[in-house]
Amino acid sequence: MTPKELNVRLDAYLSLREALGFQTRREGNLLRDFVRFIETKGFPQPLRAQLSVEWACSGKLCRGGSGHVKRLNVARGFLSHLRAMMPETEVPERGLVASYRRPKPYIFSQQEVDVLMSAALRTHPRGTLHPHTLYTLIGLLASTGLRTGEALRLTVSDIQLDLKPPQLQILNSKFHKSRIVPLHPTTAEMLRSYVHRRKQFGFDGTGGPFFLSNRGAPFPGLALMRWFMKLTRKLGLRPQSDKPRPLLNSFRHTFAVRRMLTWYQEKADVLSLLPNLAVYMGHLRPQENYWYLSATPELLGAAAERFLDYSGLGGES
């Protein structure tokens, strides 16, 4: 097979993936880089697994440290396709490149959430929409488990406060999925208050972004991240030897853990409810909840109590 023929095979593979509903822009860019890498190695035939591993490890680590694993998985898919026509093609086994262990997340206490929200209202410049935007954003992240980007991309029409129950529309989010997020009454009331504040400052539009800067532009994510990092340092929420650094995404972890804890306390069927949590948080599968369910002392204690009840050792008949 010549380099030209390999590129034709690549085009056919990507077209097949697109026909099956996959987004292939990033995957296509990686695989074209993979083909160029093969060409620099003299286009050896048959293609050996070691070549794929060398290519995967030649790239810079992606955010989160899992870039090499992702690159190898992309190559594996294409090589599996090639092997149907070129049986001697080697497909590297999973696990040849060490996977990255995600860091332990920071879990906020309710007191810390309250302190952060109070500090947001005291943010300068006072007498503007800015502190109210920060206060509402923090409250929304803490009470819904939304991704930060999802919250910032909300439009006025996505906030449906007149429905019963009030809800958010999260459209075309991660994995190009959309979902409905029901709101707790206190969260809905907080959003109504922000709508009122928008009107007070002259932002009474029925469309466009919901969270605004003082100039009426979409609230910038980078500014939110920088403000939050400064605030957590100022409040003393710094990483410790046994604790990671608090991030905006930590609200998402906290929401999942607190929801699980509430279910345990209510003696609900937690296992059957996990798919609901996956849908609520925008996950494709319940397994994707697991990283968010950190083993906090409260959650472990509630789980242990449930096990004792189940096993008949907890004093209940």
Image (cartoon, rainbow, N blue to C red):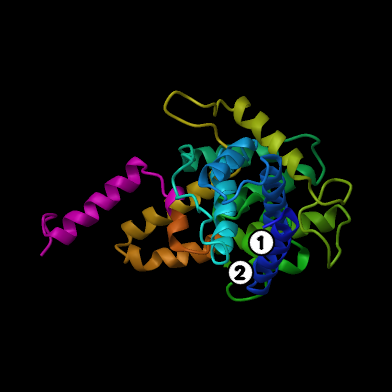
The residue most toward the top is: 241
Residue appearing at x 43%, y 58% in the figure:
287
Would residue 101 appear left or right of 317 to someone viewing this image?
right
Q: In this view, does 225 lie above or below 85?
A: above
Residue pointed to by mark 1:
173
135 or 71, which is in the foreground? 71
109 or 279, which is in the foreground? 279
Q: Which of marks 2 and 1 is in front?
A: 1
Residue 60: x and y, percent?
65, 35
Would residue 307 appear left or right of 208 to someone viewing this image?
left
Closer to the chain start, of discs 2 and 1, is 1
Residue 5: x and y, percent?
72, 60
186 or 113, which is in the foreground? 113
Residue pointed to by mark 2:
179
Is residue 296 in the magenta section?
yes
**Local secondary structure at mark 2:** strand
Residue appearing at x 54%, y 54% in the figure:
76
Instruction: Mark yes or no: residue 170 visible.
Output: no
Residue 177: quadrant of the picture: bottom right
Instruction: Mark yes or no: residue 16 visible.
Output: yes
The residue type indicated by label 2 comes to Arg
Residue 41: quadrant of the picture: top right
Residue appearing at x 11%, y 55% in the figure:
313
**Local secondary structure at mark 1:** loop
The magenta stretch is 290-317
